[in-house]
Amino acid sequence: MAEGLAEGRESRNIEIAKNLLDILDNEMIALKTGLDIHTVEALR
């Protein structure tokens, strides 16, 4: 169950990051969402 919750949180954070791509830089998105900087770069 915990694994499913973690996957759900990561999916939500990725969606949030996608919405922020046009207004924030990669470092700020990574900081605010808790995603790895490489993940944010890959989204861009």
Image (spheres, helix red, strand yellow):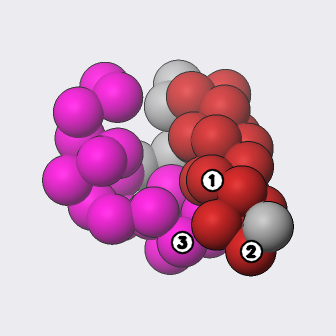
Classify 10 Å Cα crowding around label 1: few (below 14), some (14-19), many (20 and above): few
Query: Does dot 1 land on a helix, a strand or a loop?
Result: helix
- Provide the residue designation for mark 2: 2
Q: How many angstroms separate mark 3 from mark 2 (CA)?
A: 18 Å
- Provide the residue designation for mark 1: 7
Instruction: Tell me, yes or no, if residue 2 can be seen here.
Output: yes
**Does residue 39 appear to the left or right of 3 in the view shown?**
left
Residue drawn 64% across the image and 41% down it:
11
Residue 17 belongs to magenta span:
no
**Does residue 42 appear to the left or right of 4 in the view shown?**
left
Residue drawn 45% across the image and 63% down it:
35
First to last magenta residue range: 26-44
Image quarter in which the N terminus is found: bottom right
Q: Mark 1 against mark 2, which lies toward the viewer?
A: 2
Classify 10 Å Cα crowding around label 3: few (below 14), some (14-19), many (20 and above): few
- Provide the residue designation for mark 3: 34
Image quarter in which the C terminus is found: top left
Q: Earlier in the sequence, mark 1 or mark 2?
A: 2
